[in-house]
Amino acid sequence: MAQNGLVPVTFSRHGRRYWTRFMSYQFAANRAECAIVFQEAQQAAATFPILFKKTARGYEPTGILSVLKDRPTPFVSQAGRWLAAYVPSALRCYPFQAAPTGRKTADQAPLFQLNVDESSGLLSDDPKDEAFFDNTGAVSPALREVKIFLQARAAACEATLALCQIIDSLGLFELIASHDGIPLPPDKFGVSVQRLKTLSQVEKLKLVDSGALFLIHAHQISLSHCGWLSRAHQQLAQQNPQEKYTENSDISGFLYAMANAQNDDFLGTSGV
């Protein structure tokens, strides 16, 4: 069994197995961060802080769901309801994930390995649930929809990594430990305001023409959420467990109000 229950989806392993769509975001309750892509940067910036994380593939934007170590995110209620205005694309296909292979198709679309979290509790042997494969051994229509969505997201990831590479090439990333006195998760990067001021006109045009400047602005605007995210943690810590995340609690009320203030399009889940 792979770590965290993730295993590749194969006919030999899942040919006669089934799965159900998740009805709760409890799986994300203890997630401190979530990778995002360029196409959702605006919605993400209106919802939670965006920092950058250095990975083996380069820098990638990351939505911060918790600013305190080992504390659950305020965005998931005790009942598993997602309270924020926007659902990151990386969370929409649970229990499935796409693992990049580093290879591409003939039309340059990125290839990925489709994995499933077998510890999710969403796999079954009940034919009434969604099949992984049909009787011919082909991917079922329901799972094909998941693969199409993840394929689009994989392409978006490639484009986002390319934008981050441009930002990095201009020496704009710097470690960021705090914002407005709020400690941030370790080993995260922000964009240096001082370095931005020293860019030449040619370098500035490169950011504008590539779209990387939009990603930088999304990051900068999103940092305004650090303060209330920290306060949300403090308020949750002061409440009794029985009182947390009730419909009338202050924190859920605040998050609902924030959600309602956003454009309805932010709530869509059909695209990346």
Image (cartoon, helix red, strand yellow):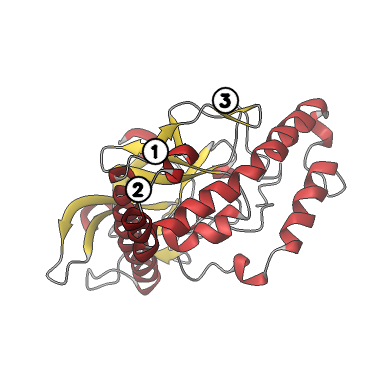
Residue 178: x percent and y percent?
Answer: 57, 28
Asked whether the residues under the numbered discs 1 and 2 touch, taking CB atoms below 8 Å apart as contact, a structural biologist would say yes
Q: How many marks?
A: 3
Q: Residue at x 77, y 42 (%)?
A: 245
Q: Which mark is residue 167?
A: 2
Quadrant in which residue 230 is drawn: top right
Asked whether the residues under the numbered discs 2 and 3 touch, taking CB atoms below 8 Å apart as contact, a structural biologist would say no
Mark 3 is on which residue type? Answer: Lys
Q: Which mark is residue 173?
A: 1
Quadrant in which residue 182 is drawn: top right
Say if 85 sits above or below 152 in the image.
Answer: above
Q: Residues within 10 Å of mark 2 (few under 14, many from 20)?
A: many
- Foreground: 75 or 172? 172
* Disc 3: which residue: 69
Residue 267: x percent and y percent?
Answer: 62, 66
Spatial CA distance of label 3 from label 1 is 23 Å
Residue 202: x percent and y percent?
Answer: 31, 57
The answer to whether any part of residue 94 appears in the image is: no
Residue 25: x percent and y percent?
Answer: 59, 49
Q: Residues within 10 Å of mark 1 (few under 14, many from 20)?
A: many
* Left or right of 86, for residue 259: right
**2 vs 3, front mark:** 2
Q: Residue at x 34, y 63 (%)?
A: 210
